[in-house]
Image: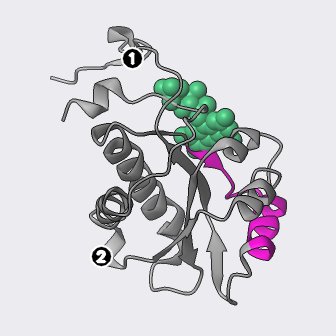
């Protein structure tokens, strides 16, 4: 999959809505993720309401770029599931899938960290009025990119240890 090698963080977006069929593909990619014992501990909030997006952009000191996005997807997880210790790992894979699929579709986005920072998790929970037991994991603002750059080259042979 080429997106692994072309995906970058995109924090500036054109003033253009993301089409519903593309939003559906993003969500399908997220839910295609593997999870611990296939527990699929997730729910996804799809936010296009501008005033709510502006509030979400203030839920973390590092989420300001979300304010300019036409769409913010908020992956959330259930605290009470069989392998609860693994839920943030499960959500990480789903969020990376979202990111790669956005790139595939000619969109751009960036993972904005919410969990495991309790104050940010609480802020997003309040803004979205999440039900009891459901926790916000990340913010993923997405839109048509208004910036582009090549992916940083991070392969480092010295970090590889062959055990033969
Ligand atoms: C778990 C996680 C949390 C992140 N949180 C933020 C964030 O709060 N704000 C932000 O602007 N970027 C955030 N990023 C994006 C990283 O800064 C970015 O992925 C990194 O600098 C590498 O750049 P690249 O994505 O363009 O390859 C986050 C990325 C990850 C994986």
Task: Identify the residue at image location x=67%, y=88%.
Answer: 131
Q: Residue at x 76, y 56 (%)?
A: 117
Q: Can residue 123 be found in the magenta stretch?
A: yes
Of 80 and 8, the residue lying toward us:
8
- Pinpoint residue 56: horizontal percent, then vertical percent: 75, 58
Mark 1 secondary-structure assignment: helix
Whether residue 116 is in magenta: the answer is yes
Which residue does the numbered mark 1 point to in the structure image? 159
Instruction: Please give the range of residues in magenta.
Output: 111-127
Q: Where residue 119 sits: x, y (%)? A: 84, 61
Mark 1 nearby-residue class (10 Å; few <14, some 14–19, many ≥20) = few
- Mark with earlier residue (2, 1): 2
Residue 64 left/right relative to 142: right
Q: Nearer the viewer, residue 59 or 47?
A: 47
The residue that disc 2 covers is 38
Percent x, y of residue 85? 54, 71
Q: Is residue 116 above or below residue 164?
A: below
Q: Quadrant of ligand 1?
A: top right
Q: Residues within 10 Å of mark 2 (few under 14, many from 20)?
A: few
Of the 4 image quadrants, the one containing the C terminus is top left
Give percent across and percent down for residue 139: 62, 54
Q: CA distance from mark 2 to mark 1?
A: 31 Å
Q: Residue at x 61, y 46 (%)?
A: 69
User: Which of 88/8 is in front?
Assistant: 8
Q: Is residue 1 above or below residue 31?
A: above
Residue 151 appears left or right of 66: left
Which residue does the image show at 56% across and 44% down from the upper left? 111
Q: Quadrant of residue 47?
A: bottom right
**The N terminus, quarter of image:** top left
Colour mode of the rendering = one colour
């Amino acid at each position: 999959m080429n997106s692994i090698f072309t995906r970058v963080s995109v924090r500036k977006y054109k003033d253009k809505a993301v089409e519903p069929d593309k939003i559906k593909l993003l969500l399908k990619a997220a839910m295609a993720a593997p999870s611990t014992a296939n527990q699929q501990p997730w729910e996804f909030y799809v936010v296009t309401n501008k005033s709510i997006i502006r509030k979400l952009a203030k839920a973390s000191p590092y989420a300001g770029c979300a304010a300019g996005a036409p769409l913010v997807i908020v992956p959330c997880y259930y605290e009470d599931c069989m392998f609860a210790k693994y839920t943030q790992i499960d959500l990480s894979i789903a969020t990376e899938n979202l990111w790669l699929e956005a790139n595939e579709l000619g969109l751009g986005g960036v993972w904005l960290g919410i969990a495991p920072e309790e104050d940010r998790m609480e802020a997003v929970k309040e803004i979205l009025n999440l039900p009891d037991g459901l926790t916000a994991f990340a913010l993923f603002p997405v839109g048509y990119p208004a910036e582009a750059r090549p992916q940083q080259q991070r392969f480092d042979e010295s970090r590889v240890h062959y055990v033969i």
